[in-house]
Image: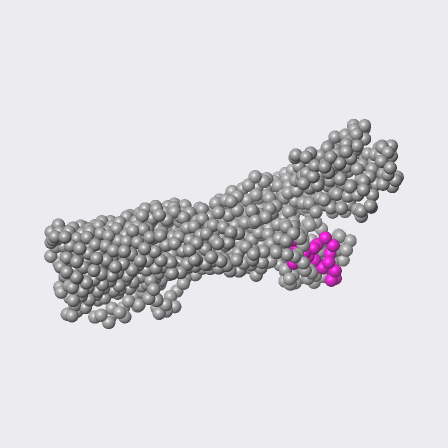
Amino acid sequence: MKKRYIYALPLFVIALVSCEPSFDNEINADTYTNGDADFSVYVAVGNSLTSGFMDGTIFKSGQQYSFPNILAKQFEVVGGGSFTQPSFEDDISNVGGLLLGGNQIPGVSTRLIMNMATSSPENIKGTPTIEVSKLQARAYNNMGVPNAKVFHLLLKGYGDIAGVANKTANPYFVRHATQPSASVLEDAMSMKPTFFTNWIGANDVLSYATSGGEGVDRVGNPDPRTYGGNDITDPGLFSVAYKQIVDGLTANGAKGVVATIPDVTSIPFFTTVPYNPITVELLGGPEKVDALNQFIGLFKQILGSQGQGDRLQLLSKNTPNPLLIQDKGLVDMAPVLKVALANAGLGLPQSAIDFIANAYGQARHATAKDLMLLTSKAQIGAAAFEPTGVELIDMLNVKGVTYPIGDQFVLNQVEQSTVKTATIAFNNIVRSVAADKNLAVADMNAILNKAVVGIKVADGQIYTADYFTGLGNLNKVMFSLDGVHPNARGYAFVATEILHVINKHYNAKIPLVNPGAYPGPTLLPSN
Amino acid sequence: MVKRIISLAMISLVASSAFAGGYRISMQGQRQLAMGHTGVAVIGNAETMFFNPAASVYLEDRFNFSAGMTALVADTKFQNETYNWENSTQNIGTPFYVYGSAKITDWLTAGLAVYSPYGSAVEWDRDWQGSHLVNNIDLKAIYFQPTIAVRIGDHFSFGGGPIYVNGGVEFNRNLSRSMTDESGNRTDVTIEAKGVHAWGYTAGFLVSLDEHFRMGLNYRSEIIMKADEGKAKFNDVPAFGKDMFVDGGIKASMPLPAELTVGASYEFNKWLFAFDYNRTYWRAYDALVIEFDNPAIGTSVNPRNYKDSSTYRLGMQYAANDKWDFRLGWYYDESPVQDGYFAPETPRNDSRAYTGGLTYTFANKFAVDFVVSYLHFSETNNSYDYYMEDGNPVSFGGTYLSSVFAAGLGLSYSF
């Protein structure tokens, strides 16, 4: 009797191992549904925001976190098929950047990392290995092309390698265009999408904004051949091109989501650097402030004679002081300054007077209404010229304090208003085209505006539109170190918002993603 | 997904694993377990050393020994429909006991009990969705309890003794929801505290109103397990964190809560009926606080906020003849975990247990006890809402469902 029990015990346990409890509502094949949409072939068109661009470039490990790639994984449970993205297998050291014929394409550097030794974002050390001339010649599910504006998606030859040098072609599209004469939309349509996302149009206004308003507002001029890279697209052209893209995507009955363009005021590239970071300590103490104020007082007096005295203000010893910036919208006071400085009896040679007058001709102190670009941070305190040995001149050699930071680092009020007008116009077009075709709209503009104060997601975390501030927001920062594009976590956040929209508009039930599990910035102890 | 048992040889002699509310294991006697783990008012065999030492003075034989071990399989399933998360974990445990008592005089009995009333072994898939709360935990505590029991008159006895506890814990979790090293491996920390010991006591009394009806009370004190020389080991730390997340010492403490049991039994012919009520003072477990010696890391405070909980137990025994005894039992065990504090390290809700067993006694008074029990934990949709991430509380939850199957073997001998 006893022995039999001893043998029975382990057998009993083994038998029970196979028994598992089961939920009242177990997740199964019926839990999630595709609703009114067919996700079998999902194609994403758009710009860098669709391509998986982050930290200033596309790099191999970052690309997998493109929002379309994240979405496609969620679509898998409701009939979604495979999802392909342009190959970045040649990004051997995972640093991004682009080469053309072995030479680095200017302005397309390695990805940004946070150097903890210097506490600043830097391009990671390393050499790009992504060669544009290695043509893949195939269409992908992810047709997001960095830098593309709305009309570029229709542009034949946008993927022709011969056009890279003179900038009529886009090196990213060149890498995978099915043929030199193909357009992005044609290649996208060759995939025969049943479902699409279309988030295009941001570059039509943002490149103007990120250039500090250096481009031209092309309102009323629908000919893109006359446009420069930083120009704002004519809303008329935008409307025609946008309709054509959506007409193409929906021609075979595909359903999809279009997304609106965010406001500059919700992007950390424009909101991170304060207009007034200059403290007494930075100026070198109260005595230095007095010396500088004598100098500023002289300028205020001269400018005041022309009714322009409020361009500058005396420095405060108690509150942070504004940056000195250049504003090309101002009347150039250099001629007035030249005369006045010559008469001031400073004992300066004419060349020095000319230099100072030219530097200050369109200078003013920034106000709370100016948006300092993220790129201005490196300008603050930097030297503007080689030291001359002349004390009075060299005193001017501190950018942002005594030498104006260039206009291209500031989005002033006039430029902001131009950007805002265009953004509203473009978003109205996006919404109206979507309404015509009964497409879902992911209002990224509204969502990111909410994120300025913070958006609380389902798990309780609050995500904001802030730049990386250090270990304090390491786990919740959504924007990559370039300040414009989301990081992996941010793209997961974008994917979640789009899933909400799809679930609602198409009566689908697709599981959401949790941004908290996605990585933030890359921190390195040194670079 | 499921941690299958590779070999039963893995069941070591050391007790671990868990169920019942929190990290209490109710498996301290095969005969009493078969009766729903009642026993505070039962005069059975040496198992009474645990259930109520006061009863040991009534044992008929001069020497009484009882030992047993249970093999249990604990299944927990987890799902979250919002994110399409599914996970499960299967863990085995082997709580054990060894009891012995000796009658010194007619009214005085001394004895020693060794048992494992607390433990928790849960191993989730590494880097699973809740890995920022726990990847795995293995908590063990063994009680050594010498007792004496004194009978005063025919109707009253009391007994008790000190308890020495030796235990340890190993706990691993990921440092955050997204941190990885440069190769993409999630950064994690293992907290280990071994050989932690502490003292407590137990005391109880038994009232025998007549030959049939008995009432008992037993109290086991709270014991705080304080680890002053624990270790923290960080794994897969990214280069930027190498200076901060350095392996080092930790201090932590964990309460093994006090437990009060009152109960009654009624014996009639070949039948014995027992009822026990347990109150476990789980409120002692308000937070798991881990103080890192490294000031750069500081103190990790993980609120638990357990509440006191009750267990209601019923059991019956039928003594068919001098060879065979049969037993059945049931109990209802309230979870001490409050809503919003449901952490996956002890993923268990209110439970109902169904138990049964039998004993075969050989002519030489050597007896073999066999018991099976099944615990079903109510499905619960719950979350842990107090994980702090960059200053904000972040919730992790879903639907949890657990069950435990156990089979145990015991040996008794008295003379």
Is A336 situated left or right of A324 in this image?
Answer: right
The residue most toward the front is A287
Q: Which of B196 and A124 is in front in this view?
A: B196
Is residue A101 one of those drawn in magenta?
Answer: yes
Q: Magenta segment, which residues?
A: A95-112
Quadrant where the N terminus of chain B is found in the figure: bottom left
Q: Does residue A137 appear to the left or right of A449 in the view shown?
A: right
Q: Which residue is drawn at 22% across and 52% down?
A: B204
Q: Position of residue B398 (x, y in %)?
A: 42, 50
Quarter of the image where one finds residue A287: top right
Left or right? Give the position of B415 relative to B333: left
- Kindly report the secondary structure that dominates the magenta region of the rendered protein: loop
Residue found 71% across the figure and 34% down from its top: A315
- Left or right: B213, with A354 as reference point: left
B20 shown above or below B93: above
B310 up-or-down from A344: above or below: below
